[in-house]
Image (spheres, rainbow, N blue to C red):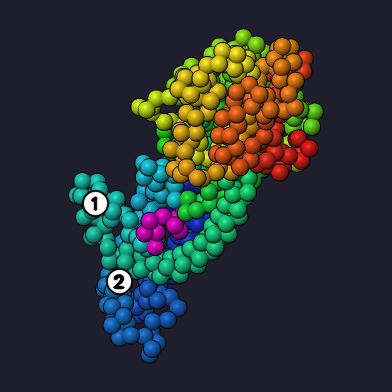
Amino acid sequence: MIYFLAVIRQAMNNTNRALMGTLIGIALFYAAFSYLFTVLDLSDVAKPLRVVIDPFGIFGGASAPDALHDAYWGLAGLYTGLAGDDNGRYLAIALLSAGLALVVAGCASKPTRDLKGPPEDPQEYLFTHRPRAFLWCLMAPWNILTVCWRMKKVPVVLPILLLPFMLPFALMMDVILAVLFLAAWAVMTVRIRLAAAKDNEAYERDAQYAVCPKCKRNFHKPDVKCRCGLVIPFPAPDRHGVRYHTCNRGHKIPSTNADGVRAGLKAVCPHCKGEMLTHEAKPLVISLVGSVGSGKTTLMLSAVESIAALAKEKGIVTEIATPGISADAQRRKASVSPTHPGELDSEYFFLRSRDLPEKEVVINDISGTEFYPDRDKVLFEEYYRYNDGIILTVDPLEVMALHRSQSPTKGSKNTPVSTLESFYHMYTEINGYGPAVKSTVPMAVVLTKMDDPKVRQQVDAEPSPEAFLKRHGHKMMVDIVGTAFEDVRYFKVASLGDAVDAMAPFAWILAENDPDLKHRLFG
């Protein structure tokens, strides 16, 4: 029994040590107790060795089934025959000792304690909740047969020859293990269900879902990567553990987010297998739309810089997760290069404080060339299915130039109206909207480059950005936006200079979607 306890102490996590050690330990103690009394009883040949199989006489009464009674006593007769003289007595003790040793070895063998999961789920199961757990538990005293069979089958002859001397101890242990297992299974099942319900409630409150910045898909929960490199499904209280899971290489992985420990795990997208951070924070997704050179990237960098500064004033920590919006990128926003065409990773950052549940702000900034009309266009803007707000950037200089030249906007590849039409076609196609459907996603129409005095003078000459667009031949844009979106607001912002207010459209969208940010950061 000491050997068994020593083996399981090295082999598995704390919960499995407690479960397996308690259940099999009690059964082994009972077997050892019966063995001791059997050895003592061998000194008196007049008494059959019923202590081995019936130490409390529970099968010797009149109520015991005859078949079971005869089977037990037939086995006892074998020991009685061996104990006919001193040499037989010693042989009986030796064989009983060997039988008990084989039972203990079976309980400590690899088949008993091998709780590892398959390659697609490489983490230990709980002793009480692995596949066919009840059968595996009952097999524990017999597993020396399995071990010897796997050793090229020849060594299995030894436990087969000693099977009659293993049988009493193994049968007794199975009876005890069955009762203890069912009790432990019931207790662990209740614990798992209660912990899982509590954890799921917390996840739905704080995160709801996660977003991959690489493939842009959203999903309920990501996979996670252990420090040894193994990727496992999102750890939550289940048949792998309540507070912790253990990977197949023996490393602990938190399965609840108590004290924020699970939020620090490296997440893996279940679709593209890309690595990311989620912090189990609620994602707020903003998509930037605009023609080439309309100022999307500069607006984004300036807005992130302003939000971080405001958050610092309010005692909120900002963690920038991607290099595209890092402090270095913010310093270079006045000379930012045009956004490269094609599918780019999302930019994202986190906001958190003691009294603010952590938020993840995800910004999708793609090149204006992606809004060129193209019938064969491959749509990769998966985030349009779940985004929380859209910012349409409009360059006033371009609007005024088009108005002065009297150039038709429809059909041109790089104008505000053609960009809007191309975007709306993509947006409705990805979401499966019909022509009469009006989106409830907040839409911010932003006139950029207000840091240019001439631009500001022209825009401020009108009562509103909306009026400016209508005055300069872009009534069609205003009509399309008003028809396609229920919640629309117009802004005029400066992303550079002393009067930077690029944060305004972002703050409006974030406040519209999240009451915590509305009151704690922007209130």
Residue 344 falls left or right of residue 504? left
Say which residue label 2 marks: 79
Residue 335 falls left or right of residue 353? left
* Depth check, front residue: 395 or 138: 395
Res 283 quadrant in image: top right
Amino acid at dot 2:
Tyr
Q: Quadrant of the C terminus?
A: top right
Res 308 quadrant in image: top right
Amino acid at dot 1:
Trp
* Depth check, front residue: 364 or 206: 364
Residue at (68, 40) in percent of width and height: 512
- State the CA–CA distance, disc 1 to disc 2: 27 Å
Q: What number is the disc on residue 149?
A: 1
Residue at (40, 76) in percent of width and height: 54
User: Does the image show residue 17?
Assistant: no
Q: Position of residue 460 (x, y in %)?
A: 75, 21
Q: Is residue 453 above or below residue 137?
A: above
Which segment is the magenta one? 126-134
Q: What number is the disc on residue 519?
A: none
Residue 299 falls left or right of residue 21? right
Decide whether the magenta segment is chiefly helix, strand or loop: loop
